[in-house]
Amino acid sequence: MRTRSLWLLPLVVGALLLGACGDDDGDDGEDTGSGNGSGDTTEIALPEDVTLVNDGRLTVCSDMPYEPFEYEEGGETKGFDYEIVAAMGERLGLDVEFRTTPFDSIIPALAAGDCDMIASAMTITDERAEQVDFTEPYFDADQSLLILAEDEGTYETLEDLAGKTIGVQVETTGASYAQENLPEGATLREFQTGDEMFPALISKDIDAALQDFPVNAYRAAQGDEFVVTETFQTGEQYGFAVQKGSSLLGALDEALAAIRDDGTYDEIFSTWFGEQN
């Protein structure tokens, strides 16, 4: 299995230069768009025992917005995860629909049958693997510290935030890392979504945001408000998740392997993160 590292990507370089996540069924989300498989690239058959929430469609639980992985713009779902899953859906002959689902309830939503899979920049962990089955990893990621550009000389490292307030997203690996490495006297403020931390930084309700490096780097690269001052090499990998024991897992792994083999993965990756060395 090939894996990806973001250290040398143009996006990350830019961020560090600035500084140096259908049907109305009553859930918290709504129909946020679909990717239509053309049928021309269909090459993988679903196992006969797979029952989908909606026939002919992969219904996906995803915590949006979480740029650049999944978000909505102009009524359409976009992002790296979305494009990868849509490409996998084509290989399976399925449309794709992303449903907004809060991250702290995303696994229960899958277990309840609200969706067929989770695609939400979710790190594979032993604890989560007790509740869901993960595909092969599709993305490498670490944690990072994001601050206001004006505070760059003040909060260069996590330890500089002693006595300060650090924002994290609830039930994430970033929150766990922050809790385990909390500077003396610092407090954590949890947010329902990662996107909520950016306005909290601007309003100075928090002094820093600790979350996935590609998300913080992407936001820092959008302008001159924020900088990434420190990265933490946690060696995390993202995976897509299905219900325990679901035979959909094998089909998704086949589809992921297919888009890697034919170059589709590389093309999507370069669109969002630049060419890989």
Image (tube, rainbow, N blue to C red):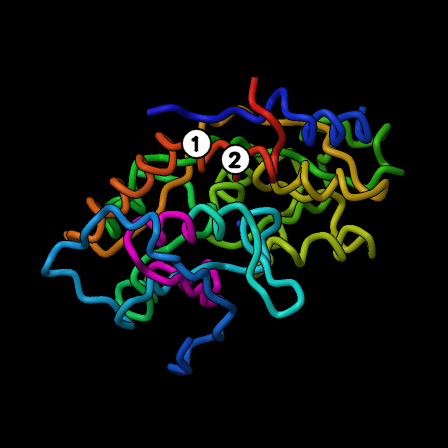
Magenta-highlighted residues: 85-107
Q: Residue at x 45, y 36 (%)?
A: 265
Amino acid at pointer 1? Gly
Amino acid at pointer 2? Glu
Would you call the spot at circle 1 few (<14 residues within 10 Å), some (14-19), or many (20 or more)?
Answer: few
Would you call the spot at circle 2 few (<14 residues within 10 Å), some (14-19), or many (20 or more)?
Answer: some
Q: Which residue lies furthest to the left in this view?
A: 48
Left or right, residue 155 beside residue 64: right
- Circle count: 2
The one nearer the camera, 232 or 122, is 122
Q: Name the residue under label 2.
A: 267
Residue 27 spot, x, y in % from top left: 42, 77
Q: Are marks 1 and 2 in contact (CB under 8 Å)?
A: yes
Q: Which residue lies furthest to the front in this view?
A: 40
Residue 180 spot, x, y in % from top left: 50, 35
Left or right, residue 136 beside residue 248: right
Q: In this view, does 229 lie above or below 196?
A: above
Quarter occupied by the C terminus: top right
Q: Is residue 178 magenta?
A: no
Q: Is residue 253 above or below residue 51?
A: above
* Residue 263 tag number: 1
